[in-house]
Amino acid sequence: MGAGMIDKQRGVWIYESGREVLQHTAAGQKILQDRWNTAWIDSKGLCCLCEYPVHPFAATLEHKTPKGAGGGKHDDRQANLGISHRAGNASKGSMSLEQYLKIPLDVRIRNCCGGK
């Protein structure tokens, strides 16, 4: 078996390591929406970066382990996904969630919410 295989019905690349990358197809977008919904329910509406409430229309799907340069670490499995503020997601960049959470909470809140 090669580096990965695609499950065309599901719209996802599944790698031998178990890593999944959703495809930009109708099936892949449906899975993405389902995973967003699950992440939202699991988060109870709280940002995984700053622990403040986030409105669903202002929320984005956060990769806890970053996608990596060129997508080499990109993993769309549910366990790697969380909900965050868009601004916080942008400020986190390519850091892992573990690295980002070492930043003082007041800075993370400012990054996510503009200092609420």
Image: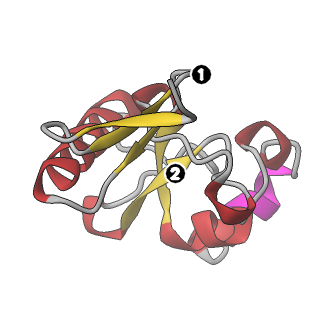
Confirm whether residue 77 shows in the render.
Answer: yes
Q: Is residue 65 left or right of residue 77?
A: right
Examine the residues drawn in magenta and state their main secondary structure. Answer: helix
- Residue 106 counted in the magenta span: yes
Picture quarter with the C terminus: bottom right
Q: Amino acid at mark 1?
A: Ser
Alpha carbon separation for disc pair 1 and 2? 21 Å
Q: Position of residue 44 (x, y in %)?
A: 34, 34
The boundaries of the magenta stretch are: 104-110
Q: Amino acid at mark 2?
A: Glu
Q: Position of residue 69 (x, y in %)?
A: 74, 63
The single residue placed furthest to the bottom in the displayed view is: 114
Q: Position of residue 115 (x, y in %)?
A: 67, 73
Task: Say which quarter of the image contains residue 102.
Answer: top right
- Residue 108 counted in the magenta span: yes
Relative to 24, is 72 above or below? Answer: above
The residue that mark 1 highlights is 17
Q: Is residue 1 left or right of residue 41?
A: right
Q: Residue at image x 51%, y 22%?
A: 18
Q: Residue at image x 49%, y 70%?
A: 86
Element class at badge 1: loop
Q: Nearer the viewer, mark 1 or mark 2?
A: 1
Q: Which mark is residue 62?
A: 2
Residue in front for this viewpoint, 102 or 28: 28
Relative to 63, is 15 above or below? Answer: above
Task: Say which quarter of the image contains residue 65.
Answer: top right
Q: Residue at image x 26%, y 68%?
A: 57
Element class at badge 2: strand
Residue in front for this viewpoint, 75 or 39: 75
